[in-house]
Image: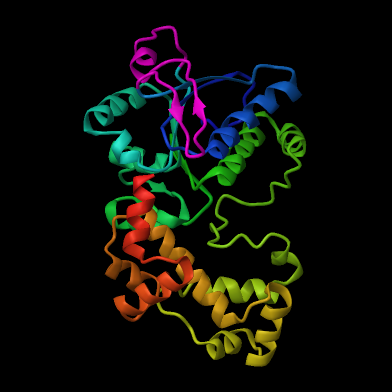
Amino acid sequence: MSLFSPANDSLNVVILLMPDSSLMSLASTLDTMRAANRISRRTLFSWRVITLDGEPAVLSCGQPIHPQGSMQWTMADTELQRDLLICIAAFHHEKHMDKQRLAGFRQFARGFSYVGGVESGSWVLARAGLLEGKSATTHWEDLEDFRDRYPRVEVRPDRYVVDGRIFTTGGAAPTFDLILYLIRSRYGHTLALEVASAFIYDGKAQADSPQPLVSLGALEQHEPQLSAAVRLMEAHLDSPLKTQEVADALGFSVRSLENLFRRRLDISPHQYYKRLRLQAARRLVVDSRHSMQEIAVRTGFNSLAVFSREFSHFYGESPSRYRREARSR
């Protein structure tokens, strides 16, 4: 029987929490299950949060989370019901999961009926060989690098992907969607709606909804033309369109497009587009190992000199210095 088939029995979940993970990713995983238990008045989910070594995991916000055990201790627990293992990871996952620990994780994961990777947990699963020949996703910032690193994985830009006994999600909100999908498919639509309502969450996103670079919120519905313009810019970060080309694609005049951006965002389309590219560049500067030349190319700057000048003007220091300072914190 699939994890996502109708059932009445309880699921036992082990959450392997890596240091530098997102608190929201943990909450999206854990609190949805807690709410399902509370609303149904049954123990539909039981869980254990563990870390690699049993020590507290300090999350990206600086908050330490005290675990209920280590991976090794949990592996030795012969009484444990091994239904689902979820690995939550984010920054510096390769540093935290070295080759020796990765070998232990590979063995550990084999004992579970189902395995999930949240955000950079997808990278951990891929490094352990669990995604070979499978479809998967990860956070949108890393999709291109993930595809390059693991050519035998069918990488999708979806919010979450389920493939056999493995699932992967793109981050906190997609994980909320995934757990709601699990509750809905396993325990029924009514319970899933009540869980979503408890968090005042509309739950409209589908699994294959693309992960957006920019979350437009209410503007997506109330300003569909502006939304379309932003999505077009997102799709052409490495080869920026001219304002005239954006306007033409949407059937606008340049003046109408400029008026729309100034009225709703108080900025010109050209300035917004550059800001979008620089924000993407900043994430690559901080979170990737790409050279500055590569980052310049990926974000549509025609030379390293132009990129460095624009980055320095926007962020107040050169991209190289920005990277050094970010990594020294």
Residue placed at 41% from the left, 65% from the top?
281
Quadrant location of residue 46? Answer: top right
Instruction: Name the side, left or right, on which 211 lies relative to 44.
Output: left
The majority secondary structure of the magenta stretch comes to loop
Q: Which range of residues does the magenta coloring cover?
A: 53-81
Look at the image and name its color scheme: rainbow
Identity of the residue furthest to the left in this view: 100
Quadrant location of residue 164? Answer: top left
- Indicate the position of residue 149 as horizontal and vertical percent values: 28, 53
- Indicate the position of residue 123 as horizontal and vertical percent values: 35, 43
Can the viewer see residue 144?
no
Residue placed at 25% from the left, 33% from the top?
98
Quadrant location of residue 115? Answer: top left
Instruction: Name the side, left or right, on which 19 lies relative to 252.
Output: left
Image position of 185 with respect to 217: above or below: above
- Indicate the position of residue 224 as horizontal and vertical percent values: 70, 72
Q: Nearer the viewer, residue 262 or 130?
A: 262
Can the viewer see residue 301?
yes
- Indicate the position of residue 235 as horizontal and vertical percent values: 49, 71
Q: Nearer the viewer, residue 169 or 20?
A: 20
Q: Nearer the viewer, residue 309 or 59?
A: 309
Image position of 313 with respect to 252: above or below: above
Residue placed at 33% from the left, 25% from the top?
110
Is-magenta flag for residue 70?
A: yes
